Amino acid sequence: MSRLYDSMEPRVMDDDMLKLAVVEQGPQEEAGQLAKQEGILFKDVLSLQLDFQNILRIDNLWQFENLQKLQLNNNIIERIEGLENLTHLIWLDLSFNNIETIEGLDTLVNLEDLSLFSNRISRIDSLDALVKLQVLSLGNNQISNVMNLIYLRKFKCLRTLSLAGNPITEAEEYKMFIHAYLPDLVYLDFRRIDEQVKELAKMKHQFSIDELKHRENVMQLRVEEEQAKREMLEEHKLAFIEHLNGSFLFDSMYAEDTEGNKLSYLPGVNELLEVYKDKFVIICLNIFEYGLKQQEKRKTELGTFNECVLEAIQENQEQGKLKIAKFEEKHLLSLIAIREENDLPNIEKKIVECSEDINELFNVLMTLEMQLVEQLEETINMFERNIIDLVGIFVENVQGLMAQCRDLENHHHEKLLEISINTLEKILKGELDEDLPDSVRALFVDKDTIVNAVGASHDIHLLKIDNREDELVTGINTWCTHLVDKIHRDEIMRNRKRVKEINQYIDHMQSELDNLEFGDIID
């Protein structure tokens, strides 16, 4: 049973409502009062309670990016929406609303507990992304088709299901059906499932379940095969040689070539095409295999580079930690000595010495950072030269192989033109024995017409080859440029972050010394 509209006006989820809820539900002790004064960042909120607010529409939750628990029960919500950014959500309560359709949950991949109790839902679907779902409450809705429950078999973690109050529960075989088809359930409608009853249900529906499992296995196999194909295609795209491991490029040349397809009816052209295709596909396969090998070389080069950078940074950090540890040991003793000193000139002298030690540490840490910058700059430049060389060699060799494709096309064009002109001469003399389709005979009006038809086919083929070559060359050059630019940007950001860390640490140590100088000593 869903909620009726209250006499009060439907409310909007605006910033004021959200801020009030966050503050009221926050800690009440001193830390909570401080949070009220300084404000609480929505991104830091883990749990949010918005029940009994007369909310009509879910909105403005995008800032709660780390939210794990959300209560929206007992409102008048009509659609599940506005939850896209809540990818860390584990627990969601939308019970006692006016929801008719399950939707808007595609990004909630970490959701474990979902309550849609007492709404207007008539069909269970659109939960596919909830692979971690353990608890599902759908009681007091309008679900009437028992076969719809088979959909829940895909949720391997589901252990608790509530459907009480739906028309489906009035069926005589309701519980036995669920016990048989959802064997991993532990609780149904708030009661633990008896194992003996579960076994009886399994035996009763054994034949149907076996058939279902077979269909599921076939479907799963298809899904896995399609997934493997997609992953393989992505790998090929990373190597810039997708669809070159077969006749795709050759077939695409004829896909839009109307004249070329007509000319294939000419005597001897089919045999010519078969030889052409075989040789063309061999070159494509050579490009494909070469591309995979070059991709492995680029991966190795990038992996070696990343290892060198990481090793250099870690070694530099270790040196810095040793310098800081040595400084802090001495600095602590100096502070103790200052606090125990009673003679003001000696105190001032020791404070100056401490300040000089801090400055010396700053210089040491900055020197280490400059050394690292120079070391990484040399490593990055070497990598840049190597990767550009690898890309350049790859492009050069691919262009050579693509030139071979063009040579094959030119040779085929010459042969096709020769056959076409010979056929024209036979037609004009009435010596052609073969029966050609009318659309093909229409090309053989005169020499210019047939030459233009063969030429148009040739132009289409060359354009396809040129476009594929341009796509490959542009793709890998763009990748190389973006990679090198990103490496340089990352190093600049790393350096800025490290310099900031050093300055913050030094400022902290100096501030500690200054406070000692003007606080503890004077007191």
Image (cartoon, rainbow, N blue to C red):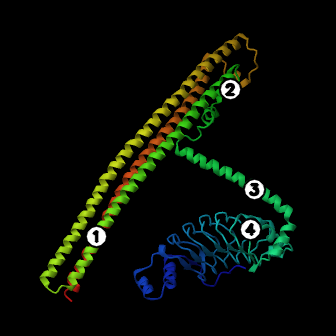
Residue 31, quarter of picture: bottom left
The residue drawn where x is 64% and y is 68% is 132
The residue that mark 3 highlights is 217
The residue that mark 4 highlights is 123
194 lies above or below 452 = below
Which element carries disc 1, helix, strand or loop?
helix
Q: CA distance from mark 4 to mark 2?
A: 53 Å
Residue contact between numbered discs 3 and 1, judged by CB atoms under 8 Å: no
Residue contact between numbered discs 4 and 2, judged by CB atoms under 8 Å: no
Q: Amino acid at mark 2?
A: Lys
Q: Residues within 10 Å of mark 1 (few under 14, many from 20)?
A: few
Closer to us: 359 or 231: 359
Q: Amino acid at mark 4?
A: Arg
Q: CA distance from mark 3 to mark 1?
A: 64 Å
Closer to us: 80 or 269: 269
Q: Position of residue 242 (x, y in %)?
A: 57, 41
Residue contact between numbered discs 2 and 1, judged by CB atoms under 8 Å: no
- Looking at marks 2 and 1 on the same chain, the residue that comes earlier in the sequence is marked by 2
- Looking at marks 3 and 2 on the same chain, the residue that comes earlier in the sequence is marked by 3
In this rendering, position of residue 355 left or right of residue 265: left
Q: Position of residue 118 (x, y in %)?
A: 71, 78
- Looking at marks 4 and 2 on the same chain, the residue that comes earlier in the sequence is marked by 4
Q: Amino acid at mark 1?
A: Lys
In this rendering, position of residue 211 left or right of residue 354: right
Q: Residues within 10 Å of mark 2 (few under 14, many from 20)?
A: some
Callout in the foreground (3, 2): 3
The residue that mark 1 highlights is 326
